[in-house]
Image: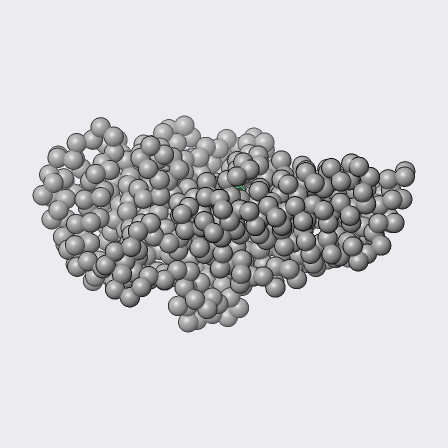
Amino acid sequence: MTRLVNDPAQFADEAIAGFVAANERYVHRVPGGVVRSTAVPDGQVAVVIGGGSGHYPAFGGLVGAGLAHGAAMGNLFASPSTQQIVSVAEAADAGGGIFFTYGNYAGDVLNFDGAQERLLARGIPCKTVTVTDDVVSASPAQKQKRRGIAGDLTVFRSAASAAEAGYDLAGVARIAALANERTRSFGVAFRGCTLPGAEAPLFTVPEGRMAVGLGIHGEPGIDETGIPTADGLAELLVSRLLEEAPDGLGVDGARVVPILNGLGSLKYEEMFVVYRRIAELLERAGIEIIDPHVGEYCTSFDMAGTSLTLFWPDDELAELWEAPVDTPAYRRGSVAPRERATAATVVDDEATGIPPSDDASRSAARDVRRALETIVATVDANVDELGRIDAIAGDGDHGIGMQRGSHAALAAAVVAADAGAGAGTTLGRAADAWSNRAGGTSGALWGVILTAVAERLGDDGTPAASAVAAGVAAGASGVMAHGKAQLGDKTMVDALVPFSARLSDAVGTGATLADAWRVAADAATRAAAATADLVPRMGRARAHGRHSVGTPDPGAHSLALIVTAIGEVLADDRTDDRTDDKEAT
Ligand code: ADP
Ligand code: MG
C-alpha cells in the first residue's frame, strides 16, 4: 500500500514534480512529461517513450544520454493524452524526426497514434514501434497483439543507441523492430498493487499462491499455482522463455541479455537468489550471458512479483548494446560529460482566445454545462462500481479515469462559458480537458465523442436536435475509427452505436430531443447490459476474456449511466420548446 499521500488525485503530478526536482541534471519538465536537460546534436532522431505513471523507472527515469530523449508521463496507470505526447515530442525534437516506442496497450496506442498524426500534419516525420514482449498475453500466432512489460528496456535502449550512432528515422525504426522481435518476457505475481488512495489492491492472490502471467497494470494473471521455491521459479521462467526463442534462433550457442525485473516490492536479495539459478540454467542450455540485469526496470506500483526478459541480440544489436547510458535510474558504461540544453520549448495549446458567439449559443453553453454537471454527478455516484467491474478483466481504473476526466471537463467548460464562449467552444474545451486529465482508452474516446458533438453545436444559434444527433453519430464513427473496435467486441461501442442509431432515427421522425434521447438511452442501457454475455476482443480486457463473462463492459456501462442521467435532465427541462423552435426554422 501507499502510506505517504497528500491528495490522491494529485499523486502522479506531485511525484513527477519531485522526480524532476531531484534529477535536473538529466531532465527538464515540459507540459505532459520530461525531456533531456542535456544538449542533443542537431538532426538526431529523438526517441520518445511514455505511458502511465506508477511504473518507475519507466518512463521518466529512462530519459537521458544513451536512452530516451523524452517521456510522456500520464496519470497513474493511464496513458498520457494525445496533447501531452505532442507537447513532449515537440520539445524533444532535434530536427531528425520523432521515434515513438512504448508498451502495446490500447490507450497508449490510441493516444500515441493520435499524436503521430498531429505531428505528421505539422511536417514532423515520425515512426512508431510498440513493444510486445509479454509471451502470455497472446499466442505466438498473434504476437503483434502482445502487451509490453519489462522488455520495453531492450527496445528503448537499442533504438536510442541507434539514434545516438547517427541512424536515420527509418534505421532507428528498423533496429527497434528487430530488438522487439528478439525480446521475450514472462512474469508472476504474489500480491497485487494498491494505488494511492485506493482501499484495496487491484487484484489479490490467495496466501501461498502465485498468479502466472501478470500484467504491469495489475491485470490479473492468466493462471494460478502454488508458490514454488526460488529455484522452482527460475526453472518455470527459463523453460517457458526457451520454448519461445525468437524464430529461427538456436538456443545452443546463442547470446542473451537476461533481465530479472522486480515489480515493485520484491527484495533484491530474493531476486539474486532466483537469478543464481537462472544463470545456471541458461549456461546449461549453452547460452552465452551478456550484460545481465537484476533490479527494477518496469514496476507495477507496489506489486510483489517478478518477470524475466530474455533479449537475443544479433551482431548489430550487440554492438549497439555496448554504447554507454546515463539516466536518472539506469546507467551503463561511462558517458562523457554533455553540455546542458537551453530551456525546453514549452507548448501551450490551451492559451488561445475564445471565438465570438451569439446569445443563443451562449445560452446553449449553459445547457452544456448542466449536462457536464450531470455527468460528474453520475460518475461520482458510480465511481467504485465502475472500478470494480473494470478490475474483473481490466486494470480497475475506469471509475477514477472517468472521474478525473469529467471533473476536468466541467472545470474547463465553466471557465470557457464564463469567458463568453458559445456551446461549441465550451464543449470543445471540455473535450480536450477530459482526454488530457483522464488518460487511458476511455478518456481519449470520450474526448473524441465530445469533440464531434462540439463541432456540430457550433458557436452560433440554438443547436437543433438534428445537430446533436449528427454530432453523436460522428462521435460514434470517430470512436470506431480511432479505437478500431466493432460491434460485439465488448467495448463502449456496443452501447454507443445503438444509442446513436436510435437518437438519429427518433430525431429524424420529428421527436423532440428529450423524447428521442430517452428512447436512445433505453437502447444504450439494454445494450450495455447485454455486453455481460460477450468475450472482450479489444483493449486491456482482451487478455483476460474469460474472467469478464457475466460482467458488463465498464465503458459501455458508464456510457449508459451517463446518457440515462442526461435524459432525465432533458425531460425535466423545457428544452422541448426550444428544439421545436429551431426545427421550425
Ligand atoms: P483503460 O482500458 O486504458 O484502462 P478505462 O478503464 O478508462 O481505460 O476504459 C476501459 C473501457 O474503454 C472499456 O471498458 C471499453 O469500453 C473502452 N475501450 C477499450 N478499448 C476500446 C476500443 N478499442 N474501442 C472502444 N472502446 C474501447
Ligand atoms: Mg481500465
Give the residue at x 35% y 47%.
Answer: 149
| Position above or below: 414 against 134 | below
Q: Quadrant of the N terminus?
A: bottom left
Q: Quadrant of residue 464?
A: top right
Residue 267: image x %, image y %?
A: 25, 63
Tag count in the figure? 0
Q: Is residue 47 visible?
A: no
Q: Quadrant of residue 366?
A: bottom right
Residue plotted at (50% across, 70% down): 6
Left or right of residue 456, residue 204 in this image: left
Camera-side residue of 397 and 576? 576
Residue 507 visible in the shown view: yes
User: Which color scheme does this rendered protein use?
Assistant: one colour
Q: Residue at x 39, y 55 (%)?
A: 218
Residue 521 horizontal/vertical position (percent): 68, 49
Q: Is residue 313 above or below residue 265?
A: above
Q: Is residue 94 left or right of residue 466?
A: left
Q: Residue 272 placed where, x, y %?
A: 19, 58
Q: Position of residue 81 (x, y in %)?
A: 54, 47
Q: Quadrant of the C terminus?
A: top right
Q: Nearer the viewer, residue 458 or 345?
A: 458
Horizontally, residue 468 falls left or right of residue 363, namely left
When the figure is inspected, residue 141 is found, relative to residue 1, above or below; the finding is above
Residue sitting nearer the eye, 426 or 143: 143
Q: Is residue 143 above or below residue 234?
A: above
Q: Residue at x 23, y 59 (%)?
A: 226
